[in-house]
Image: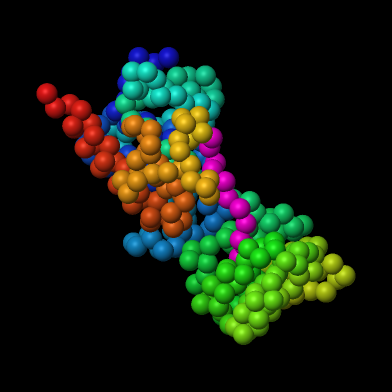
Amino acid sequence: MSDKVYDVIIVGGGPAGLSAALVLGRCRRSVLICDSGQSRNAWSVSLNGYLTREGIHPKEFLAIGRRELEPYGVEWKHTEIVSSVCRGDGLFEIATIEGESLTSKKLILATGLQDYWPEMPGARAFYGTSIHHCPYCDGWESRDKPLVAYGLGRVAVGLSMSLKTWSPDVTLCTDGTNRLTREDREKLERNGIKVRTEKITRAKGTESQLEHLVFNGGEELPCQAMFFSMASVQRSDLPQQLNCEFTAKGVVKSDNKQRTHVSGLYMAGDADRDAQQVIIAAAEGTKAAISINQELQNESYK
């Protein structure tokens, strides 16, 4: 185990973690980022909705962020954190997958979420280019095209209504499930949304461009983009290990400064399931960093 005690260790080197590190580095805090390289938007070809960075490739965005940390002495470790405890002395001790132990006064979990993607044959080639989970991120690029809202049962009814903002041609596909209520169907019909409940056997297209969904029986539905509504889960089990409190929806409880119920532990980014936008994740990282710096200041007062 290293004898060094960092002011802050940040688990996760995405927008939330990088933003927190930038603020804390500028506050002259000793900061270590531990990142496994498993980015939620690794499939995406562009990052949208972030002022001054519109359309940038996600990898380029992260590379710029890392370069901007260099003047402030922020350390970086490419590793996966497999365990974490809050010790009796109030310090956090985390362990890397390689077996190294690291210690800090404060801990930020910016570990993000993991999405469940539609596992239909052929779909993987279109993930991030013409199959997406967020219309706020990718709806503009799909405007006025024939769109599909995908979800099992009733979960994508709201998504299909939302997609009407970007295109008049929306079809709701429930992939072999048929649990829509009469009220659902009437609402969809009133708003010009078509419904297909048949099982989808394949996604077809050219290179990265989705062009058709093939139903059981061979009929094809022309479409140029698909947005899906499926579950997402915490990418890391560190919140459970640290005995965080969770809401009924499985979200770690945190306040408006990103503090959890565990003293010194903060959540930032998609892992706390606020509106899931890169710019909001970065803002949450900044909020957490300011609060942590203030805590460290108060703890140093005589």
Residue at left offset 62%, top offset 70% = 157
Between residue 91 and residue 88, name the one nearer to us: 88
Residue 131 versus residue 261 in the image, above or below:
below
Inspect the magenta stretch and tell me whether residue 229 lies in it: yes
Question: Closer to the camera, 4 or 190?
Answer: 190
- Quarter of the picture containing the N terminus is top left
Horizontally, residue 13 falls left or right of residue 149, namely left
Work out which residue is located at the far right of the displayed protein and give it: 217
Above or below, 2 against 193 in this view is above
In the rendering, at what x and y percent does residue 81 appear? 50, 29
Quarter of the image for the C terminus: give it.
top left
Query: Horizontal and vertical percent for residue 136?
Result: 48, 66
Q: Residue at x 48, y 42 (%)?
A: 246
Decide which of 87, 61 is in the foreground and name it: 87
- Residue at image x 65%, y 60%? 126
The answer to if 219 sits in the magenta stretch is no
- Residue at horizontal 34 percent and vertical 62 percent from the top: 51
Please provide percent x and percent y for residue 156.
62, 66
* Whether residue 259 can be seen here: yes
Write the start and end of the magenta stretch as one range: 226-237
Say if 127 sits above or below 267 in the image.
Answer: below
Displayed quadrant of residue 28: top left
